[in-house]
Image (cartoon, rainbow, N blue to C red):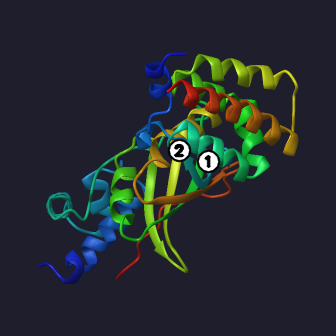
């Protein structure tokens, strides 16, 4: 059943399965079933339903780029835009492979906050100068290059 | 310098080919130049930090060479670099080089 803002109604078992998957998505259906006291086929069915409804968007893996020996820089870019163009700017940014995240914020001004990755500072600058600054509606850009990451976690859901 | 050559250099550029002024990596001032004439005007207004950032990265001469395809201006910018100017001295040197060249192009048009 669909709720407002396209929310999907889940019961407590669904939530527990999601929590288990967030901790370790490589667990088998049997392992999750044993932990939650249900059959592996139930876990399978619930996961399939959550995939179909889009609650589970994708299955992926996180790499440690440093351990892979890949040099890169990440940066947080704040793009100040003409409010009439902000949606288009955000969409155009979302299509770039250098862009990891795009969010919008309305504080005193309408801002687009973007997380970007590039091989080095030169590539980062070239991307911003050639692909972001020319977008219609971009008024100015502030970029902070990340020098040290202290914590990076995805939120752990916990809704009973 | 033929009229055709001059008018090609003096043309108005697309957004993609405009020069965008930054003060450091990724920090765009909101100022851009869509023609050589606009570039000459912006040089007088842009913060010196932006002029220094682009000048010593070679961005100005690269734009003159690859986008405007103006070999003479590229050469003049390279010769300014030999003087290693900074701050307002850089602004004055660039202003002189670009404005003089712009006048020549306009009179040849």
Marks 1 and 2 share the same chain: no
> In the picture, which quadrant includes the N terminus of chain A?
bottom left
The front one of B64 and A112 is B64
SS at badge 2: helix
Does residue A75 sit above or below A52 in this rendering? above
Residue at 39%, 65% in the rendered image = A86
Tell me: A123 left or right of A101: right
Q: Residue furthest left?
A: A1
The front one of A116 and A34 is A116
Does residue A31 sit above or below B55 in this rendering? below
Residue A155: tell me if it is visible.
Answer: yes
Residue A69: tell me if it is visible.
Answer: no
Residue at image mark 2: A128
The front one of B107 and A78 is B107
Residue at 87%, 38% in the rendered image = B86
User: Residue A143: where, in percent of width, then height?
Assistant: 62, 54
User: Residue B30: where, in percent of width, then height?
Assistant: 58, 56
Residue at image mark 1: B26
SS at badge 1: loop
Tell me: B3 left or right of A50: right
User: Residue B90: where, in percent of width, then height?
Assistant: 82, 38
Q: Chain of mark 1?
A: B
* Contact (Cβ within 8 Å) of mark 1 with mark 2: yes
Does residue B20 sit above or below B72 in this rendering? below
> In the picture, which quadrant includes the C terminus of chain A?
bottom left
Crowd tier of the residue under label 2, counting other residues whose Cα lies within 10 Å: few below 14, some 14–19, many 20 or above: many
User: Residue A112: where, in percent of width, then height?
Assistant: 47, 64
Q: Chain of mark 2?
A: A
The front one of B109 and A68 is B109
């Amino acid at each position: 059943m669909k709720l407002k803002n396209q929310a999907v109604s889940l019961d407590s078992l669904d939530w527990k399965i999601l929590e288990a998957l967030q901790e370790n998505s490589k667990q088998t259906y049997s392992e999750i079933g044993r932990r939650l006291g249900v059959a592996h086929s139930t876990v399978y069915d619930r996961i399939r339903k959550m995939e179909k409804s889009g609650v589970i968007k994708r299955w992926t893996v996180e790499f440690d780029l440093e351990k892979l020996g890949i040099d890169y820089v990440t940066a947080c870019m704040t793009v100040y835009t003409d409010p009439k163009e902000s949606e288009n700017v955000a969409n155009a940014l979302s299509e770039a492979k250098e862009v990891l995240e795009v969010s919008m914020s309305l504080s005193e001004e309408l801002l687009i906050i973007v997380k970007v990755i590039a091989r080095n500072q030169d590539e980062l600058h070239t991307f911003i100068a050639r692909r972001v600054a020319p977008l219609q509606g971009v008024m100015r850009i502030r970029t902070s290059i990340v020098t040290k990451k202290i914590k990076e976690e995805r939120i752990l859901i916990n809704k009973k | 310098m033929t009229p055709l050559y001059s008018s090609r250099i003096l043309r108005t550029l697309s957004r993609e080919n405009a020069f965008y002024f930054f003060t450091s990596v990724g920090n765009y001032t909101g100022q851009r130049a869509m023609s050589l004439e606009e570039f000459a005007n912006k040089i007088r207004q842009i913060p010196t930090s932006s002029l220094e950032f682009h000048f010593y990265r070679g961005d100005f001469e690269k734009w003159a060479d690859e986008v405007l395809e103006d070999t003479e201006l590229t050469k003049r910018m390279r010769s300014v670099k030999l003087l290693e100017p900074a701050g307002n001295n850089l602004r004055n040197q660039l202003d002189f080089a670009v404005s003089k060249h712009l006048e020549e192009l306009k009179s040849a048009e």
